[in-house]
Image: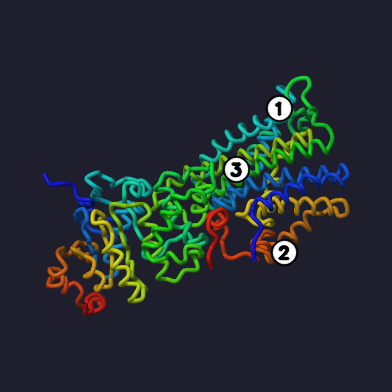
Amino acid sequence: MTTAAVLELRGVSKAYGSLLAVDGVDLRVERGERRALIGPNGAGKTTLFDLVGGRSRVSGGRILLDGADVTTMEEHRRARRGIAKTFQHSNLFDGLSVLDNVAIAVQHHAGVARRVLRPAARETAVTDRADGLLATVGLGDVAGATAGALSHGERRQLEVAIALATEPQLLLFDEPVAGMSPAESRAFVGLVAELPAALTVLLIEHDMDVVFAVASRISVLHAGRMLAEGTPEEVRASAGVQEAYLGGGSGEELFRAP
Amino acid sequence: MRRPPPWARVAVIAAVLLVAPLPLNDFRTGLLTEILIFGLLAASLDVLVGYTGLPSLGHATYFGVGGYVAALAARGMTDSAPVGLLAATVGALAVAGATGWLAVRTRGVYFLMLTLAFAQLLFSLAVTWAPVTGGANGLSVPRFALLPGDRGLLLDGPLVFYYYVLAAFALGYFLLHRLVTSPFGRSLVGLRENEARMRSIGYSVLGYKLAAFCAAGAVGGFAGALFVQHQRFISPTNVSFEISALVLIMVIMGGSGTLYGPVAGAALVLLIRDELSSRFQHWELLLGLVFIGFVYFLPRGAAGLLRRARPAAATAGSIAGAGGQEASL
């Protein structure tokens, strides 16, 4: 008997009407892995993330987190079990300060989000932790700014800080460097490298520089099916993968020179 | 430019409210009393509308439940006003728990319609359940004392009653302020800003919404009891749609999501009503025009005028900003 993977998908499918967005996907991600999920637009990557995170429900198959079946578990309960994610289109508390954005996640994880007896500003443990996370992602200088006023790259960084605040065991990044400058992309790669080794990362990304810099293994999704899986070298060499992108238009974009 | 510390502002406002009725006649003192009561009611609704982002059009439900409980307690149980207040708060809390359990499962317009439906339901009940509520004739209420029993410090005269209401207002406002500036309050603002994201962080949003609904309802009932003790009378008018709408207008005109704004909104609406209703029969028409003017020119309400002078600490940025570090912009 093998030890439980952090995340295991068994024959997971998702149908929208007659369209099978995700079609019988098997996936096994071990603890501490840095797994990239690649594939052309429309391959079902974000749909798969939504199924894992609990934002939408599977049409078939099972999802196991740490060996426990979470297939029908509600989104917020999965989050408490250690799944965190950043969103493809940043999804923040735009009217709040950058610090409050992170503090909302920190206070929930610290179990003090229901407290009413003293002002939030006096929950110094929460504030300190939020400040620390902002420093980690490089937003220490703008803690007091309104989140809605941040630049695109800063918004992505804030996404990461919020996700880390829940101290997840599985972190899902949905196109984390989309729209980032090269410098910001490099900073993101550095950030992932510094994450705790026990933290498992699952990453959707089109920027192959980032994928090859970050991923220890790569899974390729195509038209809702798992096409290939292997080390970065294996995937790059795979004829099937190359073929899948030929004529797909996004081939050059995907495999532009690393 | 340095801002005065928060306690200084509180001290100034408290001093003004303490001496305000002294030069006023009984009628004006009564108006000031009413402003405090509706101010507290509007502030309680602000917890839902401004902080949690739940637009309720039925806040008269809890105002009315509190009022009827206070009236019935006064007629059948005790002449002690604080005991009546407590009973009314508990009663409104119970009704808010039951109605909120359903209401928080909806959102947007559906939430609005459901809260409105609850208020209409209670209105019908107040009219038809005559043996208890006095029906359309309402219930008159005997005089109140501060303490139960024979020598209970009668709350007699507009001035004495004003100070009683002021104390109750201070308590209620303090509790609401604590609520919205607490970590829980920050959670509510998170719901207003991005409910889906709250879920993905791990928040069970229904529980938070229900708690906010209950808190707003309880303080609304508290205000309803004060109003009945002030008027010494209650009728189905207290539960009418007009009250629900008026309170919502107070919140919006004053500036939602600020707590003090809706209190100012209450003062504004009641002053307009009082100044105009004696001279002009259709004062609601003018209130409507003023309201439109506010929505058009001051979308953040009267409080928006104050806020313009400050840095962009955002609506709830004050939560992190007020007591802790200031935005270093």
How far across and how far down the image is residue A225, in percent?
Answer: 21, 62
* First of labels 1, 2 by sequence position: 1
Name the residue carrying label 2: B293
Residue A120, above or below B100: below
Give the residue furthest to the top: B150
Check disc 3: other Cα within 10 Å, few if <14, some if 14-19, many if 20+.
Answer: many
Query: Is residue B40 toward the left or the right of residue B205 in the image?
Result: right
In the structure shown, which secondary structural element does the residue marked by tag 3 occupy?
helix
In front here: A193 or B35?
A193
Q: Amino acid at mark 1?
A: Leu
Contact, mark 3 vs mark 2 (Cβ under 8 Å): no
In front here: B58 or A200?
A200
Query: Is residue A200 toward the left or the right of residue A128 in the image?
Result: left
Q: Amino acid at mark 3?
A: Ala
How far across and how far down the image is residue B33, in percent?
Answer: 78, 43
Q: CA distance from mark 3 to mark 2?
A: 28 Å
Q: Amino acid at mark 2?
A: Gly
Name the residue carrying label 3: B216
Kindly tell me whether residue B288 is visible in this rendering: yes
Quadrant in the picture for residue A176: bottom left
How far across and how far down the image is residue A233, in percent?
Answer: 13, 70
Say which chain tag 2 marks. Answer: B
Name the residue carrying label 1: B72
Query: Is residue A160 toward the left or the right of residue B112 in the image?
Result: left
Contact, mark 1 vs mark 2 (Cβ under 8 Å): no
Say which chain tag 3 marks. Answer: B
Tell me the residue at 34%/54% (across/down). Answer: A84
In the structure shown, which secondary structural element does the residue marked by tag 2 occupy?
helix
